[in-house]
Every structure is written in structure tokens, then in C-alpha cells.
Amino acid sequence: MEKISYVIPVFDEEDNIVKLFEEITAVSKIVGKEYEIIFVDDCSRDNSLNVIKDLASKMDAVKYVAFENNTGQSAAMYAGFQYASGDVVITMDADLQNDPADIPEMLKFYGEYDMVIGWRYNRKDTLAKKIASRFGNKIRNSIIKDNVHDTGCSLKIMRSSMLKKIKIYKGLHRFLPAMMQMEGAMVKEVKVNHRPRIHGVSKYTNMKRAKEALYDLISVRWMQKRYLKIEVRETNVAR
């Protein structure tokens, strides 16, 4: 691990950005590696982009990508992955529900594993959201068998070289563990803190999430079945 790229999708999170930046900065000093923080603004309607630009003007490690139109979380993550210069990518939400303080413990497993993901064991969400998530995870596991308890947790540590091989379509950020596994990644789950949202509102409803997830689940299963795993016995072509 030489350099960490934090990729943070942002949509209407002006009250959370500065605190998240401060928390990531504090954790990065503990980790002791070169890093960058890439905020991807998904055409926010509030002052989020100006807050990010102000941080970027004060600290070279802060980068930003601003979309022309609202395109969704998958697009924001995918863009962040393409702009990331680190050999390790760490993703998290901008709403402060993910806790950057969990990162040092998660990084202990990186190396042995290519992807280390958070498991929100004690979620601070509404009962309806927790029930819907638990049901959705069971359905997903039964179909694509990624053996992950909480694929919806945005706190993920990933090997960049594998991640950048993946083409992400709308909604498929929820299936990153399965898609990384198709690239040969070893995946580890770690129980992490989950904090209640203080500022802003959730951008998803249970019904919207369920409809999109079912459609995406079919797509990922199709990709698993049709995935080409090529093993070259020998070649004289230099790479």
C-alpha cells in the first residue's frame, strides 16, 4: 500500500462535508500513508460544491469532480475510481453515518484480502429500513452467493488495480463485492460503527431501493454466469 484514494460521492451534504474531511484527515495521520480525498459532487442543489472547493483551495490532497447533471451514486463512485491515483481505494458516504475511525482496524486485513468491507452490525436506521435491508441481503446471497452480510455499507477498502477493471452501471455499486470476486478478489467483512444521520435526509426509499436492487440482481447473476475466466498456459507476448 503506497497511496490511498478516498472516494466520496456527494449529493446535498453541505452540513456534513467539513466534519467528514476533518475525520478522514485525522485517520490518515494515524495510517501514515500518502492520500487524496476525491469528492464527487452529483450536481448538488445546495452549497456542497462550494464547500468542497473551499477545502480544495486550502489543501492539495482534496480533489473534486463535479457532474453537469445528477447521475446517481453508481456514476459518482465510478467517476471517482477513474480519477483515483492511489493503489488503494476507500469509499464511504458523505452523510457521516460511516465512521472513518474504523479504517485502521479494517486496513489490518488489507493485503491478505483484496477487499475489506464494513458490516453495519448495529445499524442506526429506522426499523423499516433495517428489515428491508436484512431481507434484501438474504435474497441477494441466495442468488449470487457473495457470502456478504451487508453489501450496502459504503465503507469499503479495495485494491485499485482490480477495481478499475470493473465496468459499473447504474445501481451496481451495491454489488461491488460480487464483481470484485469475479476479478479474483479475496473479500473480508469487518464489523464497523454505524452512526445516526444528523444533517440532511436519505436519498432512497425502501420501495425505490427494492425495485432497483431486484433489476440489478438479475444483471449481476447474468454476468456471473457469462463471465469469461481466461487462464493462459504460455505466451511470448510481453505485458
Image (cartoon, rainbow, N blue to C red):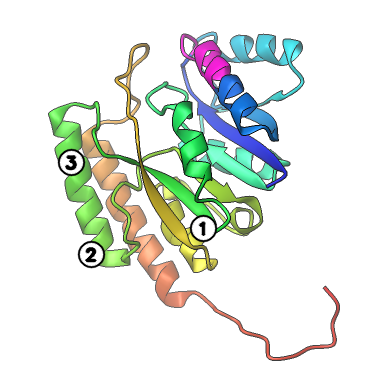
Residue in the image at 56% along x and 28% along y: 69
Residue 19 in the image: state x and y as whole percent. 51, 13
Dot 3 falls on a residue whose secondary structure is: helix
Residue type of the residue flagged with mark 3: Ala
Residue 7 in sight in this render: yes
Q: Residues within 10 Å of mark 1 (few under 14, many from 20)?
A: some
Residue 4 against residue 42 in the figure, above or below:
below
Question: Quadrant location of residue 88?
Answer: top right
Q: Nearer the viewer, residue 226 or 149?
A: 149
Query: Quick one: quadrant of the C terminus?
Result: bottom right
Residue 214 in the image: state x and y as whole percent. 28, 53
Residue in the image at 85% along x and 87% along y: 236
Residue 201 against residue 124 in the figure, above or below:
above
Dot 2 falls on a residue whose secondary structure is: helix
Question: Quadrant location of residue 77?
Answer: top right
| Residue designated by label 2 | 142
Residue 175 in sight in this render: no
Q: Are marks 2 and 3 in contact (CB under 8 Å)?
A: no
Residue type of the residue flagged with mark 1: Tyr
Q: CA distance from mark 2 to mark 1?
A: 23 Å
| Horizontal relation, residue 237 to residue 186: left or right | right
Q: Nearer the viewer, residue 165 or 62?
A: 62
Q: Residues within 10 Å of mark 3 (few under 14, many from 20)?
A: some
| Residue designated by label 1 | 113
Magenta stretch, residue numbers = 14-23
Question: Earlier along the polypeptide chain: callout 2 or callout 3?
Answer: 3
Residue 188 in the image: state x and y as whole percent. 42, 54
Residue in the image at 29% along x and 20% along y: 196
Q: Nearer the viewer, residue 188 or 127?
A: 188
| Horizontal relation, residue 45 to residue 34: left or right | left
- Residue 132 disc label: 3
